[in-house]
Amino acid sequence: MEILKVENLYKSFTGADDVVTGVSFEINEGEVVAVIGPSGSGKSTLLRCLTLLEKVDRGSIFVAGQPMVTTSPSGRVVYAPEAELRKIRLQLGMVFQNFNLFPHFSVLRNITEAPVRVAGMTPEEAETIARQLLAKIGLSEKANAYPYQLSGGQSQRVAIARALAMKPAILFFDEPTSALDPELTGEVLKVIRNLAAERMTMMVVTHEMRFARDVADRVLFMDHGQIIEEGPPEIVLDAPTNERTRAFLSNFNANGY
Ligand SMILES: Nc1ncnc2c1ncn2[C@@H]1O[C@H](COP(=O)(O)OP(=O)(O)O)[C@@H](O)[C@H]1O
Ligand SMILES: [Mg+2]
């Protein structure tokens, strides 16, 4: 089943050049899609449009078949009514580069807050789920800690647990390891690898080429607001056909990693 369908998406900001310029792709249930591309190519803006943090200028987005936003042939952009958007938003999980944990909440409360306040779970149910997720990411002993007491890697694992607690249909990651010291990236990538093994549907913007190679079913290369090349990692990362993909990958080491 198609979890995400994106058609001809455009987004610009006043005073800036067009940032996303005609992006179309689909993600099927259980698929892991990695997005690579140079800084400024529009990757974060695309993710923010997909997760309702930015409004698109035109184009269509469908989540599990439901229209989130559509654009008429005359160019009129129509978002789903607020009640529908609220349901759709619940299906979209996001993990940010800088974790964005609530600093004044404990680890446990960071995870239970949205399930209780937004999804209407009982506090007991939310806590049970939160503790299961903490066990899964190996942080049970940190349930009562506060974000300032965590390493970056631990913070990001909590941020992933927080997103998972909402049981999203798709989880988006925007460079989840870019803010981490190199020795801490492994523990975060391992959590994402385990989710991939469980067939969690994910779209991951990353500069970790080896991770993309191992975990992604498909790689999208973005440049100047467009998807320039798309395909299995063996092709896009190891034998790219597009000159711009080749030039980008040459910034990594000799094997493209
Ligand atoms: N809120 C904004 N206002 C103005 N320009 C923005 C805004 N967000 C992003 N941009 C611009 O859009 C371009 C693409 O940014 P971004 O989506 O963050 O790219 P990437 O994530 O690939 O590095 C950049 O030139 C950036 O300065
Ligand atoms: Mg970015």
Image: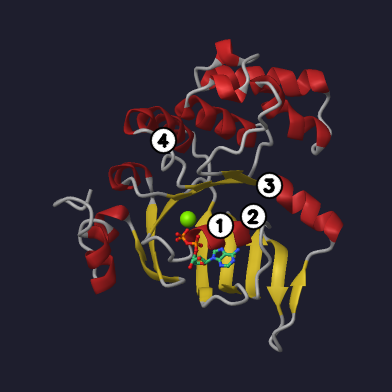
Question: CB atoms at circles 2 and 1 under 8 Å apart?
Answer: yes
Q: Quadrant of the N terminus?
A: bottom right
Q: Which residue is mark 2?
A: 51
Where residue 184 appears, as percent x and y from the top left, is 38, 28
Disc 4 marks a residue whose amino acid type is Leu
Report whether residue 13 is seen: yes
Between circles 2 and 4, the one closer to the viewer is 4
Between circles 3 and 4, the one closer to the viewer is 4
Q: Local crowd at mark 4 within 10 Å, few (<14), some, or many (≥20)?
A: some
Q: Which residue is mark 4?
A: 180
Q: Which residue is mark 1?
A: 47
Give the CA distance from mark 2 to mark 1: 6 Å
The first of marks 3 and 1 along the sequence is 1
**Disc 4, SS:** loop
Q: Residue at x 59, y 45 (%)?
A: 94
Q: Quarter of the image holding residue 169?
A: top right
**Disc 3, SS:** loop
Horizontal side, residue 38 vs residue 8: left or right:
left
Label 3, ligand 1: CB separation under 8 Å:
no
Q: Which residue is mark 3?
A: 91
Question: CB atoms at circles 3 and 2 under 8 Å apart?
Answer: no
Which residue is more in the foreground, 40 or 113? 40
Q: Residue at x 56, y 37 (%)?
A: 99
Disc 1 marks a residue whose amino acid type is Leu
Where residue 173 appears, as percent x and y from the top left, is 51, 46
**Disc 1, SS:** helix
The first of marks 3 and 4 along the sequence is 3
Where residue 14 appears, as percent x and y from the top left, is 62, 76
